[in-house]
Amino acid sequence: MPITPANGQTAGTTAVNPPDGTAEPILLELVDENGMTIGTEEKLAAHQPPGLLHRAFSVFLFDDRGRLLLQRRALGKYHSPGVWSNTCCGHPYPGETPFAAAARRTAEELGVAPALLGEAGTVRYNHPDPESGLVEQEYNHLFVGLVQAAPEPDPEEVGEIAFVTPQELAERHGQAPFSAWFMTVLDAARPAVRELTGPSAGW
């Protein structure tokens, strides 16, 4: 697993508000089953049933004790509000690399730059969200890394954070709601997680 220093790697484009004050729609990259870009679609429209396959990313950051940083999504989120999930997840802007998007959103949501961030493969899934009725049809790029600074979450994005061991995660997962995609992306990232954290961490 290649590990790349992530400091300073938060390049990316942002939606620009036109002069009339209306916000431009956020566009996602639509992809085929091989992850090749085939077009774009507005974010909410791409998640309407049955969902359009689009590019996404998921980040798993660990502290120096091998504990995973979880976030509970803010209650104001349009999709899966108030549930626990991995460190950070989202969608690259069209033309933005998944690595740059992962670093950018980690900084925006949690106020930290990963000390290390490495690619951990991809996973394709179809997960309807029973609460919102939206559908996650995603070709997801996975990243694992280390965090050394204390997170400073944006309250509009993150309601709560927690560092957990595998046992603590299992207990929390059995008691609290998690995002529909969480276990899929975690299981897909486990080989890279184990390589990063070592056998003693228990992942």
Image (cartoon, helix red, strand yellow):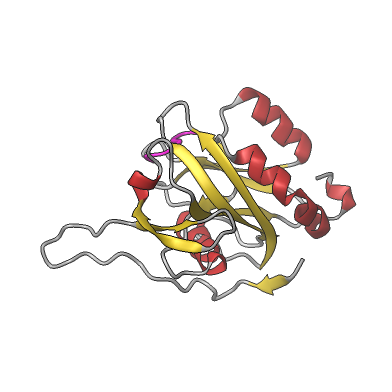
Query: Where's residue 56, x and y in %?
Result: 52, 54
In the picture provided, is 167 more to the left or to the right than 107? right
Which of these two is toward me, 133 or 63? 133
- In the image, farthest residue toward the right: 199
Query: Where's residue 199, x and y in %?
Result: 89, 51
* Residue at figure coordinates x 54%, y 76% from the top left: 8
Quarter of the image for the N terminus: give it: bottom right
**Which SS does the magenta portion mostly show?**
loop
Tell me the quarter of the picture where residue 28 sits: bottom left
Placement of 157 over or under 100, stated as above or below = above
Which of these two is toward me, 72 or 153? 72
> Can I make out residue 152 in this image?
no
Tell me the quarter of the picture where residue 74 sits: top left
Is 37 magenta? The answer is: no
In the picture provided, is 98 more to the left or to the right than 193? left
* Residue at figure coordinates x 13%, y 67% from the top left: 19
Query: Where's residue 93, x and y in %?
Result: 42, 63
Residue stretch in magenta: 77-83
